[in-house]
Image: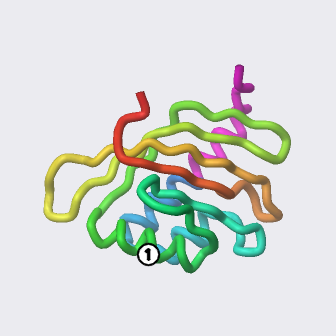
Amino acid sequence: MPIDAPDDIKRIIKERSDIFERHFAAGDAAALVRDYYVPDSMAPLVSAGDGPAILGHAAITSLFEAFTAGFEKARQVPRFISAGTDLAYEVSNSYLTPKGGGDEVEYRYVATWRRCDDGWRVEADFFAPGPLV
């Protein structure tokens, strides 16, 4: 059974997710990656579920440039967060609003959070279209 994260870690993850949403809405993929993922020296890893995993800020930025080109807004909705001293994981949903209107597109994701020198950041991220449950 997962260990429920303390409220302070849930708050930190929520704050970091709010930053992700602001950068996404601004179409600033570079800032999104810089402020959400661990530094390149810690080898951030992302899998969008439809291809091989990608590694590093440059590749992750390119991925999110494609997302921000097609979607105007991302809304992160946490479902489960479990944490230890320096590592946490989040199992959640994200809802993307298409540019030009239309229904939100639902994604499910699992993010591994790592305590870094400047706070908590995502170290590994897997997401795919579709509902969590």
Q: Answer left or right for 61 relative to 65.
A: right
What residue do we see at 70% from left, 74% from top? 40
The residue lying toward the viewer, choosing from 26 and 61, is 61
The residue that mark 1 highlights is: 28
Which image quarter: residue 67?
A: bottom left
The quadrant of the rendering that contains the N terminus is: top right
Q: How many marks?
A: 1
**Picture quarter containing residue 5?**
top right
Q: Position of residue 113 (x, y in %)?
A: 69, 50
Q: Residue at the location (60% across, 48% down)?
A: 111
Q: Secondary structure at mark 1?
A: loop
| Nearer to me, 7 or 106 | 106
Image quadrant occupied by the C terminus: top left
* 28 lies above or below 129: below
State the image coordinates of residue 81 (x, y, percent, origin top left): 63, 34
Q: From the viewer's perspective, tell me whether residue 96 is left or right of residue 89.
A: left
Write down the region rendered in magenta: 1-15
Q: Residue furthest top?
A: 1
Q: Position of residue 64 (x, y in %)?
A: 43, 69
Q: Is residue 40 magenta?
A: no
Horizontally, residue 61 falls left or right of residue 97, namely right
Near-viewer residue (5 or 129): 129
